[in-house]
Image (tube, coloured by chain):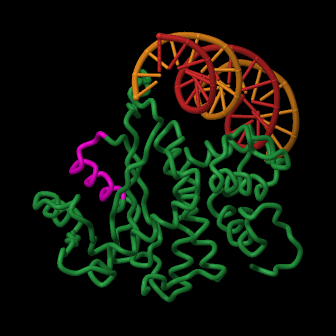
Chain colours: A green, B red, C orange
Amino acid sequence: MTSKKESSQKYPSDISDEEWEIVESIFEELEPYTTGRPRSSDLREILNAIFYLNKTGCPWRYLPNDFPSYKLVNYYYNKWTDNKLLENLNTALREQLRKKKDRKPDPTGAIIDSQSVKGTPESRRASGFDGGKLVKGRKRHIVVDTMGCVLVVWVHAANMFDGTAAREVIARLFLLIQSVKIIWADGAYAGAELIEWVFKQFACTLTIVKKQTGRQGFHVLPRRWVVERTFAWLGRSRRLSKDYERKPTSSESQVYLASSRLLLRQICNNQIHYKLATS
DNA sequence: ATTTGCTGCAAATATGGAGA
DNA sequence: TCTCCATATTTGCAGCAAAT
């Protein structure tokens, strides 16, 4: 809806000029000066291509011809996955948005949740030696702040024991941010052991938000609702509706990408519906 | 000499369709 | 629905380019 000057946007998934300015400065910070051969391709184009893929869910090979070669785009995608650039981009954007909303860059409250994602239909076909044993689909954990911004993503094979998974996610959260004092979670994370572990390890309270059968509606589970909304937003990126990625880290990148896109929209005020719900 | 960017090749793996 | 097979896609890697 931005009646921005000129359509520098060929596809709806392309980033606007305003958004690009923000991303560009973050990139300069995250990937500073290097020796070696200088880049000859256009960063913005590459990013647009990656966002296109993230949104539409098309295979790499099917990237439209007016983007740089899919090979090149894929090269950067893998690189940025390996060096955590996409993750850091998401973090930087989240800090910016929170500042804009007059909050501290790092939150003190967080909400955790998970979601199962289908792998391939022929999941039974034990596809051999990949160490990650990616059979039977994957599980996505996300931790968000009270505004619904994604803090941490973790993807792993779905057959992992839940308690173990929870520890790993929370450990990751504190690796990134130390400011969190309270985490809300659903029944899947219940268990005195875990709660105690979190408190001892990180001086943080893990609160289980229980479903109350008597009451319904959004009053009941206010914190949970925030994370559900984030999942719903993320689900609009088709690349996330199934797990196409071969490696879990690649899968995480796709989530960070979708999340970064949302954060950008909000930072640039491009009409985000803050209060849905009430109806 | 060393670092990073980019491309082409081919092995590894996924997808889709036929046939039972 | 399941298995098998042919074809398509992804990815790791080698190798050359362009910079300090």
Q: Which of A81 and A127 lies nearest the eye of the viewer?
A: A127
Quarter of the image where the C terminus of chain A is located? bottom left
Q: Which of A117 and A23 lies nearest the eye of the viewer?
A: A117
Quarter of the image where the N terminus of chain A is located? bottom right
Which residue is rendered at x = 32% and y = 77% of the image? A223
Which residue is rendered at x = 79% and y = 55% of the image? A45
* Residue A97 horizontal/vertical position (percent): 55, 78
Q: Is residue A73 magenta?
A: no
Q: Which of the 4 image quadrants contains residue A146?
A: bottom left
In this rendering, position of residue C18 left or right of residue A61: right
In this rendering, position of residue A5 left or right of residue B11: right
Q: Main secondary structure of the magenta part?
A: helix
Residue A50 sits above or below residue C8 on the image: below
In this rendering, position of residue A86 left or right of residue A110: right
Residue A50 sits above or below residue A121 on the image: below
* Residue A103 horizontal/vertical position (percent): 46, 85
Q: Which of the 4 image quadrants contains residue A195?
A: bottom left
Q: Is residue A165 magenta?
A: yes
Total numbered badges shown on the rendered structure = 0
Q: Is residue A207 something that shows in the picture? A: no
In this rendering, position of residue A26 left or right of residue A189: right
Residue A163 sits above or below residue A74 on the image: below
Q: Is residue A192 something that shows in the picture? A: yes
Q: Which of the 4 image quadrants contains residue A213?
A: bottom left
* Residue A48 horizontal/vertical position (percent): 73, 57
What stretch of residues is rendered in magenta?
Answer: A159-172
Q: Residue furthest left?
A: A192
Q: Which of A55 and A91 lies nearest the eye of the viewer?
A: A55
Which residue is rendered at x = 62% and y = 53% of the image? A54
Which residue is rendered at x = 59% and y = 80% of the image? A272
* Residue A89 horizontal/vertical position (percent): 58, 62
